Amino acid sequence: MSTVHNNRYDLAGIELSRLIKTAIVGKIIPMGNFRGGPGGRCLVVLALLHYLGYPVYRILAQYGHRLQILRRIAVKLRR
Amino acid sequence: MNFTTYYSLDSLIAAGKKEARDKEAISVDLFDTLLVRRIHDPDLVKLPVARYIAGLAAARGLKWSWRKVQSTRDTIEQGNRAATGQKFTDHEACYPLFMRELLEVIFQGGYDESLLERVTEYELTMENSMLVPRRKLVDWLKELAAEGKRIFVISDMYLPASHLEKLVAHAGVLDLIEAVVSSADTFLAKASGLAYPMIAEKYSVRPEAWLHIGDNPFSDGLRAFDAGLTAMIIHDPGEDQRKSITKRYYNYSDGRPFWRGRVLQQLMAPLEDENQPGTPLYTEGYNFIGPLIGIFIQRIAELCRKQNITKVFFLSREGWTFKKYWEKATPWLFPGDDLPETEYLYVSRMALAGASCAYQGLTQTNADIAFLPAGNRDFRDVCRIFSLKPERFAGHLADHGLAVDTCLSHVHDGYDPENRKKFELLLEDESFQAEVKRQTMDANRAMERYFDEAGLFSHKNVAIVDIGWLGTIQRFLFEAIAHRPDCPYCHGFLFGATRGIPYPESERNMIAGVMYDRNRFDLAASTLFYAQDIFEEACRAPHPTLNGYRLTEEGYELEFRKTDDAIGQAELHQDEYFAPLQQGIIDSAARFGAAAALLGYSFDDWKPWINYLLVSKLAFPRAVEVANIKNRHHLDDFHGSKKPKADFGRGLKPLWGQSQLQLKFNPLLRIRYFFRHLRGRINE
C-alpha cells in the first residue's frame, strides 16, 4: 500500500529521481519532443526541495528570524 | 514572546488539548490553518474567475480579455480597500461590493444580480477545489465541540461570512461552529486586533477564556495576545516545503513548457485526508492513466467547440471511462459554456461488421481487415466476424473452387496465394454479395433504430470517440449509415491512431489520433505501441462486449456476449483486478478539471509532459510496474482461435511480455527495445 502523494510531496510512480534519469538518458539518445526538457538547474532546485526541503524549512521556521543577517549578505553578494 | 509557536500540528494539538481545558471558546483561523491550499499563491484562484467573466462577456458580444478583467478587478479592489482605509483602521474589501462594481463596469447596462450570483458561485467552487481541510485539526475541533466548547472560525478575507460558511461546510465542520466571522462584513480585522474585542462583545466571550489558533504570528499571535486571548501559532515546515515545491513547478512552467503538465499533476495531487494509502494500481490510475485521459478529454472538448460539434458519442466499451471523465472534468474546464451533448453508444467491431455489409456488401478492404489478426484463417472466420451463415455460401464458394475451411491467411499452414485470388473474385460475385446483404440487413435495421434513438441522426456534426487504434469501429459504423441522407459528419477522435490499414477519410468521415497519430512523426507518443492493451483494459466498461443488434417487432435489442464461459470469466477477473486502477482514474477526474481550469493551459501545453509520461512509463517501465499494470486477460472476439504457423511471431516478444527476471536484471533491455522501436518509427 502506498499513497499517490508521498511524504516528500512527490508523485508516486513518476518521482523526480525518475525524471532526472530520463533527462540524462534523453541527452544521449533521442526520446521525443519534450520542448526544451526540464532543464538542469530546475532539476537541481527541485531535487533539493523534494529531498532536503523539510530539514531546511524546519530550521528556517524556528531560527529563520535569526538568519536575516545571512539573507542580507546573500542579497549583497548577488548585487 | 507572548504566544507559542508550534512546528507540527501534532505538537500544537497536544498542547492545545491542555490549554483548552479551562477555556470556553476556541477560535481558529480559516486559511492555512483549518484549510490548506493546494496552491502556493491564493491569488491564482482569481485567474480562472477572470477567464470565466471574460467568457460571459464574450457570450454577450463584449470584448474583454481575461487579463483586462483581472487588472480591472485588482484596480477596483484596491480602490475599495483605500476607501475602507479612510473610515477604518484595516484596509479591507468586501467581495460582493467590488465584484458587483467590476461586473457593472464590464457589462454596463447588461448587468443583473444573476451575473453576480453566477460569478460568486464559480469563485467559491474554484476556492473550494483548491482547499483541503486539515484532518487532525478537524478531528480535534469535533472533540472540542463534543466537550461543549464554543467554536468560532475567524478570517481576514474579502469574502463575507456567508460565503466563507460554504468553505467551512466543505471542511465538514460547519455544524460544530457557532459563528464564522469575516473581516469583510465589519471591516474590523485580526490584523489591527479590532476583530477580537468586537467578537468578544458580540458573542459574549471572555478573552481570558478564549483560545485562538492561527498561522500568522502577528494577527493571530501578537494581536490576539494584546486582546487578552491565549494564542497558539502553527508554523508547519512541511507546508512551507510543499508550497515552495508547488511554487517552483508553477514558476518553471511559465518559461519551460515541459513543466506545465507536472504542475498540473502537482495541483491535482491529493492532500491530507484525501491522500489515503491505496494499491499500486490505484496510484497508476491516478498519476499515470488518469491525467492522460483528462488531457485527451480536454482536447476533444476544445475540438468540439472549434468544429461546432453538437453531440459526442463515446463508443463502448472504453468510452464508458471517457464519458465518466468528461462528466467530472468538463464542468470545471468549460464553465458556463454550451458543451456538446454526450451519449454512450453500444457498439463493437463484431456488432458493426455485419451491419456495415447491408448496403455495400463485403468489401475487399473489410475482408482484408478480417485477416489481420493471426487467429483468423478461413472463410468461417470471415463469417464469424461479419455475422454470416457459412453454410448458405457453400454454392458460391464451390463455384470459385473454395470451401469454408480453405486457408486464406498467409500466416497459416496450407496457404496458397491462388486461393486468396479466388476469394477476391468471389467478392466480385454479385450473387454472393446479394446473399451477404440479405443476411446482414436485419442487423443494420436494428442498429439504425438504436442509433436513431440515441440521436445520431439528429445532429449535423458529431464526434465519435474511441480508444483506437485502426479506427475499425468508426469505419464499420460509417459504412453502415453512409446510405442515409441524414448521415451526420462524423469527426472521429481516437486516443491513439496506429492506422494499420489506410482509413477511407472523406468530408463526412474523418478520423484523427489525439495523443498519438501515425500520420505525424511523434517518437515519444508512439511508445503507445508498447502496451496498447493496458489502455483498453484500463478504460473498459464493466459490461460484456456487444455481439450484435437484433431486429424485433418492437424495435431492436442489444445482444451482449455471455459471461459464463472461460473467456467471459477471464474478463470478469480482469475487471476485478483493474477495479482500483479504474477508481484511481475516476478519482483524478474532478481534480484534473479544477487544476487544469486554474492553470488555463491547453493540449499543446501539456504535450511535452504527456510525451515524458509515455516514454517513461511505457518504454522504460520498472519491473514492478510491468508486473502490476500489465493486464491479466484481454478479450478480442475479432481474433479467431486458429493457430498460425509455428515460426509466426517468433522473436517479437514485446518488452511488456518479458519476464520479471529480464526486466529486473538485464540493464540494456529497455534501451535495446527503444532502439528497435526508434528504428521502426523511422522506417515508417
Image (cartoon, rainbow, N blue to C red):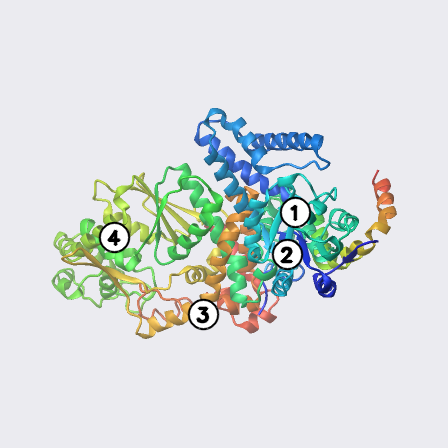
* Upstream in sequence: badge 4 or badge 3: 4
Q: Which residue is mark 1?
A: B202
What is the CA distance from the residue labelled 1 to the residue labelled 4?
85 Å
Q: Which residue in the structure is indicated by mark 4?
A: B364
Q: Chain of mark 1?
A: B
Q: Quadrant of residue B577?
A: bottom left
Given contact means CB atoms under 8 Å apart, are the residues at marks 2 and 3 in contact? no
Earlier residue among tags 1 and 4: 1
Q: Secondary structure at mark 2?
A: strand
Which residue in the structure is indicated by mark 2?
B151
Q: Residues within 10 Å of mark 2 (few under 14, many from 20)?
A: many
Name the kind of residue labelled 2 in the image: Ile
What residue is disc 3 on? B577
Q: Nearer the viewer, residue B650 or B170?
A: B170
Q: Is residue B478 visible?
A: yes
Residue B278 picture location, percent across and down: 55, 67
- Which kind of residue does numbered mark 1 sit on? Lys
Please rate how many residues cluster around mark 4, counting C-alpha atoms within 10 Å: few if below 14, some from 14 to 19, many from 20: some
- Give left or right: position of B329 versus B257: left
Can I make out residue A30 in this image? no
Label 3 is placed on what type of residue? Tyr
Residue at image point 42% right, 63% down? B537
Distance CA(mark 2)–CA(mark 1)? 14 Å
Viewer-nearest of labels 2 and 3?
A: 2
**Residue B56: percent from the left, percent from the top?**
47, 34
The residue marked by circle 4 belongs to what chain?
B
